[in-house]
Image (cartoon, rainbow, N blue to C red):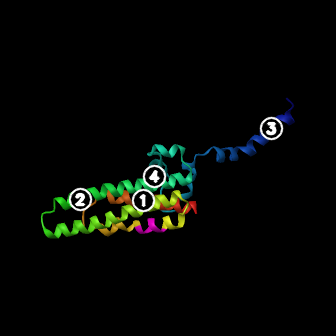
Amino acid sequence: MRPSVFLSLLLLLLLLLPFTRAISSSPIEDVCENVQDSYVDKQYCIRTLKSDLRSSKADAKGLGVIAAELTIAKATVIRSHIKELLKNASNSYDRRRAEAALLIFSNVIPSLRWSADSIASKFYASAGAVLFVALDAASACVGVVELGDAADDYVNLTLLAQAITIHLR
């Protein structure tokens, strides 16, 4: 092969290399790269989405649905915890506090389901608005009942779902 042909091919390869990386990156990498400026850590995003087996075959919209469904799962765990607190409440004051928290999380779960369905149907603005409101569920319960790390997990998952939804617009 002549040196000029070899150099031309090498130059062409070097020019195309950035494009092949962009083409070969996964939807998870792309989505997490784009949402990292929305209070979501890129590594957290990747780790969280990869924890769901469906994510390996999901596009960006599918990843938004998965993030919303992970949020629903965490809210459901919190609601179960609050039901247990209510069942074990030793006085009317603790019982009323648990009832308030249960009311909040019982209402947020259908809203989160609606958001997941809205993302799947490409109604991103509506889903994002509901996810924004859903963020307040955990903070509304602070000082009312003890949620521990589950509250932080819920907030992080909700932020992830909201960030992906905003990215999809």
Sequence-first disc among 3 and 2: 3
Task: Locate residue 5 relative to residue 122 in the image: left or right.
Answer: right
Q: Residue at x 41, y 61 (%)?
A: 112
Which residue is disc 1 drawn over? 113
Of the two numbered discs 4 and 1 in the rendering, the one whose residue sits closer to the viewer: 1
The picture places residue 19, in percent across and down from the top left corner, at: 70, 47
Sequence-first disc among 4 and 2: 4
Give the Cα distance between marks 4 and 2.
29 Å
Q: Type of residue at label 1?
A: Arg
Sequence-first disc among 1 and 2: 2
Q: Type of residue at label 3?
A: Leu
Q: Type of residue at label 2?
A: Lys
Give the Cα distance between marks 1 and 3.
53 Å
Was residue 131 drawn as part of the magenta stretch in this picture? yes
User: What's the magenta region?
Assistant: 129-133
Judged from this view, the residue extending furthest toward the left is 90
Which residue is disc 3 drawn over? 9
Which residue is disc 4 drawn over? 44
State the mark number for residue 97.
none
Label 3: which secondary element: helix
Give the Cα distance between marks 1 and 2.
20 Å
Sequence-first disc among 1 and 3: 3
Give the Cα distance between marks 4 and 1.
22 Å
Task: Locate residue 129 relative to residue 85 in the image: left or right.
Answer: right
Of the two numbered discs 1 and 3 in the rendering, the one whose residue sits closer to the viewer: 1
